[in-house]
Image (tube, rainbow, N blue to C red):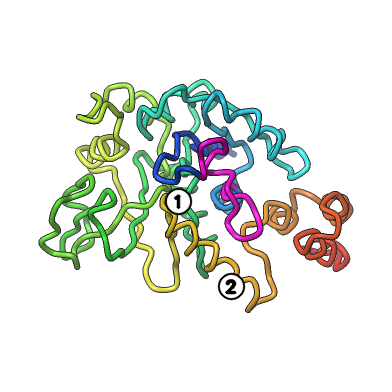
Amino acid sequence: MTASPRVPRVKGILLAGGTGTRLWPLTRAVSKQLLPVYDKPMIYHPLSTLMLAGIRDILIITTPADRPAFEAVLGDGTPWGLTLDYAVQPRPDGIAQALIIAEPFLAGHPAALVLGDNLFYGHGLVEVLRAAVTRAATTPGATIFGTRVSDPERYGVAEVDGHGRITSLVEKPNHVANPAACWAVTGLYFYDRHAPALARTLTPSARGELEITDLNARYLERDELELVRLGRGFAWLDTGTHDALLEAGHFVATLQRRQGLIIASPEEVAFRQGWIDAAQLARLAAALGASPYGRYLALLAAEGHP
């Protein structure tokens, strides 16, 4: 009997660099991705997204100055059943540079790259993420995620034809002639093992950055770029401005108060994935003291099953 070919493991990259100048003075001394979104650090949201995809080996890329703070907040991931590594991006030289920085960590594996200020929520999200993981592990190419927004000029935009195929990618367009055919590209990307090498071939843009749109365009040229459209029922929040940060906090608070659940909890995700048991969850809850977050985890642990 012929053995099945080994499917490569998809590793995660969480880019939490940059200077956060649009959020000054909030980010003068604190990384944007460590600011609170209601009851937890912002970085818990993209981290939980990778965990929901089933990814346990994750590289956190941040600035040299902010690295100690991230290590203090997240540690090495062991209590959550993860393996967290760290690397630095000395200057904000573009999202695509993250794949070059991560190349030794990836060691030839496919990658899921998520931006540290992006929040995803919606029924069916896990299934969407798992399908993208499968594609990255088994099929050449890349997967991006698109959503409708009222201000597409703030984002990279994918234009599609009547069959839903991508016809072009435009970074922050000045004018959108046909809004119905345009989807804002979110800060979540899945790539095959060739992404770091392709990123090395990019030329810096006019603003001196290695643009993720240019990397995605390389895959589009090879007819290897897939757009997954996040329609009704999904929420994508980019917390890069004061208003967006406030809106994200209200969104999370409203959901949690109405449902009695906590979203984007690495502890809960790890427990429900079977990566930690109820005893470990109880220890994590105890370490959080009498906070509402800690009490919520304690109740989960008392249930005794994911």
Residue 71 on the magenta span = no
Q: Does any portion of residue 6 appear in the rendered image?
A: no
Q: Nearer the viewer, mark 2 or mark 1?
A: 2
Residue receiving disc 1: 132
Q: Residue furthest bottom?
A: 258
Q: Residue furthest left?
A: 177
| 182 to the left or right of 269 | left
Residue annotated with mark 2:
255
Q: Secondary structure at mark 2?
A: helix
Q: Residue at x 56, y 37 (%)?
A: 9
Q: For the view shown, which residue lies furthest in the front direction?
A: 25
Q: Amino acid at mark 2?
A: Leu
35 drawn magenta = yes
Which badge, 2 or 1, is on the more N-terminal residue? 1
Judging depth in this view, the residue of 220 and 114 nearest the camera is 114
Residue 208: percent from the left, percent from the top? 27, 26
Q: Tell me the chief SS of the magenta region.
A: loop
Residue 306 visible somewhere in the drawing: yes
**Label 2 vs label 1: CA separation?**
26 Å
Q: Which residues are magenta?
A: 26-43
